[in-house]
Amino acid sequence: MKKLIFAILLAAAPLLGLASEGAHLEDANIDLGDQASLQRGAKYFANYCLSCHSAKYERFNRMATDLGLTDDEVIKNLMFVTDKIGNPMTIAMPTDKATAWFGNPPPDLSVISRARGVNYIYSYLRSFYLDEKRPFGVNNTVFPDVAMPDVLWQLQGTQKAVYKTEKDSAGHDTQVFDHFEPVTPGKLSPEEFDQVARDLTAFLAYVGEPIQMERRSLGIWVLLFIAVFFVFAYLLKKEYWKDIH
């Protein structure tokens, strides 16, 4: 058993090292019980993301039910590729053209929140900065050399990344990200744009597991049932064993 535990820890060590060396992630602080936030997130996703990124494991009619929207509201405001409310959230962009434009086809985002985590998504959306060396003129501190353009720049504005010089473990000078400085203002204030990023993150967290709020609520009742059942099971055990003890 000790050898097995040691082998598991040894195998996981590189992954733990990679996690510790990643970019600093901000706390998304989302609330999946905030239906208004999820509705806004669905709007932003449909208007800014769904042209390139699909969410093919989520259906429009399921989203309408879960988010408190009518089918007519979804068809009118959130469906731009299909007119069938029961269809999944797919895109019209052909894979070959996406590969030619971006180098790789944009990934499906159905389970991105489960693969990367909500803090990653929230930090990523806020971390684009100007970089003339990149094909779209922007880069990202959370995802260096990202092939995606900054589709939210009109809302956030543009910013530049400021780096500082620090010594690495070997004593060599290295450039470390310090902070962002605004270059051109966007339509929204920084606080308003943070809320946009938070709404989008919440929506993607919902898409990753639409049933999670119901699952958590049901889990509380299951735990309560187990606690009550334990009391009766213990009393029954005492009754069976009273003559022996």
Image (spheres, helix red, strand yellow):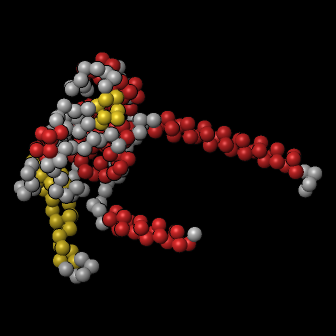
Q: Quadrant of residue 49?
A: top left
Residue at (15, 59) in percent of width and height:
161
Q: Quadrant of residue 98?
A: top left
Residue at the far right in the pictured view: 243
Instruction: Look at the picture and state if 72 lies above or below 14.
Output: above
Residue closest to the eye, 195 or 222: 222
Question: x and y percent of residue 21 in the render?
Answer: 30, 66
Residue closest to the eye, 74 or 135: 135
Question: x and y percent of residue 183 in the render?
Answer: 10, 52
Instruction: Look at the picture and state if 33 lies above or below 141.
Output: above
Q: The C terminus is located in which quarter? A: bottom right
Residue at the far left in the pictured view: 132
Residue at (21, 43) in percent of width and height:
106
Residue at the far top in the pictured view: 72
Instruction: Look at the picture and state if 176 lies above or below 79.
Output: below
Residue at the far bottom in the pictured view: 171
Question: x and y percent of residue 210 in the render?
Answer: 41, 35
Residue at (33, 19) in percent of width and height:
71
Question: x and y percent of residue 154 in the render?
Answer: 13, 40
Q: Is residue 186 visible?
A: no
Q: The N terminus is located in which quarter? A: bottom right
Residue at (47, 66) in percent of width and height:
8
Count all numbered tags in the image, as a single digit.
0
Residue closest to the eye, 102 or 208: 102
Residue closest to the eye, 214 or 25: 214
Q: Is residue 83 visible?
A: yes
Q: Is 216 on the left-hand or right-hand side of 107?
A: right
